[in-house]
Amino acid sequence: SMNTTLRMSACLFMGLVGASSAQADEPAQIPKKVLKELDFRVGKWETETTLNGEPLGRTETERKWSPGEHCLVMTVSGKEDGVQRHSTGVSGWNAKGNAIVEHWYMSDGYLLVRYPIARMKDNTWNGSFRLVYTNGKEAKGTCQLEKGDDQWVFVAEWEDDGEALMRK
């Protein structure tokens, strides 16, 4: 029956959670460099966005530590191209990929951004992204984050139907 299936699923989930907890007495340590880099982005940020140099809109981004300070929880809200947009994301450490990874769930799709730690030099993070729109269309490209005093600039570049695009 449905209740039996739900109980079995819940038991399986709890068993997996318990097994992963039993394998390690302490959580693995996130590299201090990663924590420092993530901490720089904590706070509320006003954003002006352009697409190929043309104004697209203004948004507000809030980034805060999750309980336990193992990742950032991020929200974005504002108007772009006259449309109200909302996004929620999580940014954290991927030890296997040796990268800071951001997963964004947006009004118009899903975005995955990867910043390998080897490509994070001084005040510049170089990475890649994959964007999947709600209609299934996909875009892949490169991105760069430049840190400055109390600000940062994100630039993404990709092609759409043969047209080069740059979002800043």
Image (tube, rainbow, N blue to C red):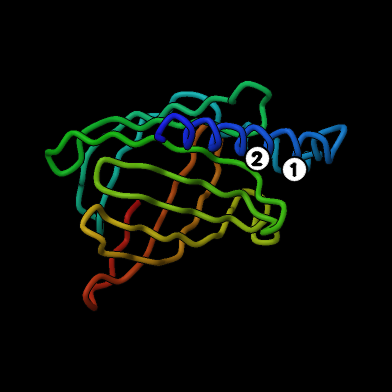
Disc ID at residue 135: none
Give coordinates of residue 159: x percent, y percent: 30, 71
The kind of residue on which mark 1 rests is Lys
User: In the rendered image, which quarter is residue 10 located in?
Assistant: top right
Quadrant for the N terminus, please.
top left
* Dot 2 alpha-carbon crowd within 10 angstroms: few under 14, some 14 to 19, many 20 or more: some
Left or right of 41, for residue 80: left
* Residue appearing at x 24%, y 78% in the figure: 162
Residue at the outermost bottom position: 162
Give coordinates of residue 77: x percent, y percent: 30, 30
Marks 2,1: beta carbons within 8 A: yes
Of 134 and 5, which appears nearest the observer? 5
Of 153 and 161, which appears nearest the observer? 161
Q: Mark 2 points at which residue?
A: 37
The kind of residue on which mark 2 rests is Glu
Q: Name the residue under label 1.
A: 33
* Residue appearing at x 20%, y 46% in the figure: 55
